[in-house]
Amino acid sequence: MPGRSRDDTVAAVVRQWRAVNPALDTGPMEVIGRINRCAALLQQAEDAPLRRAGLTRPEFDLLGALRRTGHELTPSELARETFSSGAAVTKRLKQLGERGLVERRGDTRDRRVAHVRLTDSGSALVDGIMPAQLAYENAVLSGLDGPELGELAALLGELLGQLEGRLGALRA
């Protein structure tokens, strides 16, 4: 990516800050600002294959977690798998259950615990959407070549690992 022009909205904000206060270190803004802007744009675009299937990204994440783990999960486990609150998972499971995509069953030893599994329809939906969703995501990233994608994925993975390990301590 050396030699590429950085003429994006974050670059404009950084130029403005440098004009007002040249002593500011805008390095963190250049990274975090771009990550946040990319996330916002990706959320605004919505995922076309998911939208066509009548699913939101959080609903698909729940279905995907059940599909990729290959076994029943509790709502608490689903919350951890999808980085969602328990209340959000409960609401989504209710909606997905009404659509016949997931089933809940009570635990035989502890009535407070529920186990959730994909129905055959839910599995078929996930399996049908996944190739189209990955093709959509590939199109979104098509401006980057293979080595750039690998480098970006590695750098984001490194950042994510660091944040997952210490962000809680920074909030305290």
Image: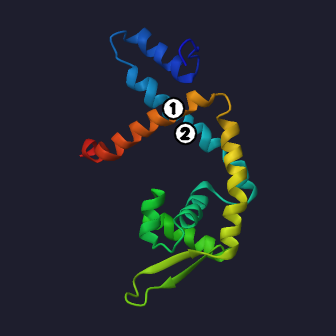
Q: Nearer the viewer, residue 26 or 78?
A: 78
Query: Is label 1 or label 2 in front?
Result: 1
Horizontal side, residue 13 vs residue 137: left or right: left
Horizontal side, residue 122 vs residue 114: left or right: right
Label 1 element class = helix
Query: Of callouts 1 and 2, which one flags the residue occurring earlier in the amino acid sequence?
Result: 2
Whole-percent x and y of residue 170?
Answer: 27, 41
Q: Residue at x 44, y 9 (%)?
A: 19
- Disc 1 crowd rating (10 Å Cα; few below 14, some 14-19, many 20+) is few
Q: Residue at x 29, y 47 (%)?
A: 168
Residue 12 vertical position relative to residue 48 in the rendered view, above or below: above
Please state, as top left, top right, bottom left or bottom right, where the N terminus lies in the image: top right
Whole-percent x and y of residue 172?
Answer: 23, 46
Question: Which residue in the structure is indicated by mark 1?
Answer: 152
Residue 31 vertical position relative to residue 89 in the rendered view, above or below: above
Q: Which residue, as the protein is rendered here, is positioned at the far front?
A: 147
Q: Mark 1 belongs to which amino acid?
A: Leu
State the count of labels: 2
Q: Which residue, as the protein is rendered here, is positioned at the far bottom?
A: 108
Q: How is the image coloured?
A: rainbow
- Disc 2 crowd rating (10 Å Cα; few below 14, some 14-19, many 20+) is few
Classify residue 57 by image quadrant.
bottom right
Whole-percent x and y of residue 78?
Answer: 47, 66
Label 2 element class = helix
Q: CA distance from mark 1 to mark 2?
A: 14 Å
Classify residue 67 by image quadrant.
bottom right
Q: Residue at x 46, y 60 (%)?
A: 81
Residue 21 vertical position relative to residue 101 in the rendered view, above or below: above
Q: Mark 2 belongs to which amino acid?
A: Ala
Question: Which residue in the structure is indicated by mark 2?
Answer: 39
From where the camera sits, is residue 100 visible? no
